[in-house]
Amino acid sequence: MESAGPKWDSRIEVTMIDLVQAYVSQGFGIGVSVKAPGVKFAKDIRVLDLHEFPQLIIAGLWRGQIHPLARKVMDGLKKIAKGQP
């Protein structure tokens, strides 16, 4: 964010994407998040795509058997990486 120009001082940091939307909806200012597949934004939130930023790199690592839900996420990420819908 620093290379984009203005200084972006963080006032609140959250650990879940849903909390960013909740705080913005309640009037706590602006939020920066990722546009994850399947995430719906509230009607009172204006979404601005930031195309100048590099793609987010995501990796998965696990030991033993992977949980079925995690397997579905990894399969979906592989399709996106290959350019498939």
Image (tube, helix red, strand yellow):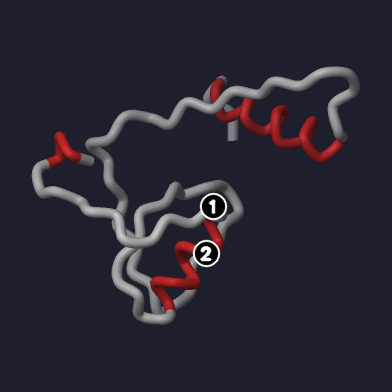
Instruction: Give left or right: position of 15 versus 75.
Output: left
Q: Secondary structure at mark 1?
A: loop
Q: Secondary structure at mark 2?
A: helix
Category of crowding for the residue at label 2, using alpha-carbon neighbours closer than 10 angstroms: few (below 14), some (14–19), many (at least 20)? some
> On residue 19, which mark appears?
2
**81 or 26: which is nearer to us?**
26
Location of residue 31 by image quarter: bottom left
Q: Residue at x 44, y 47 (%)?
A: 34
Task: Please determine whether, in this image, residue 49 is positioned above or below residue 47.
Answer: above
- Residue holding disc 1: 15
Instruction: Give left or right: position of 81 versus 64.
Output: left
Instruction: Give left or right: position of 80 versus 20.
Output: right
| Residue furthest out toward the right | 65
Of the 4 image quadrants, the one containing the C terminus is: top right
Location of residue 38 by image quarter: bottom right
Q: Residue at x 27, y 46 (%)?
A: 50
> On residue 56, which mark appears?
none
| Residue furthest out toward the left | 5
- Give the alpha-carbon distance from disc 2 to disc 1, as whole Å: 8 Å
What's the amino acid at mark 2?
Leu
What's the amino acid at mark 1?
Thr
Q: Position of residue 9 (x, y in %)?
A: 22, 53
Of the 4 image quadrants, the one containing the N terminus is: top left
Instruction: Give left or right: position of 59 versus 10.
Output: right
Task: Confirm or deny contact between disc 2 and disc 1 (CB under 8 A).
Answer: yes
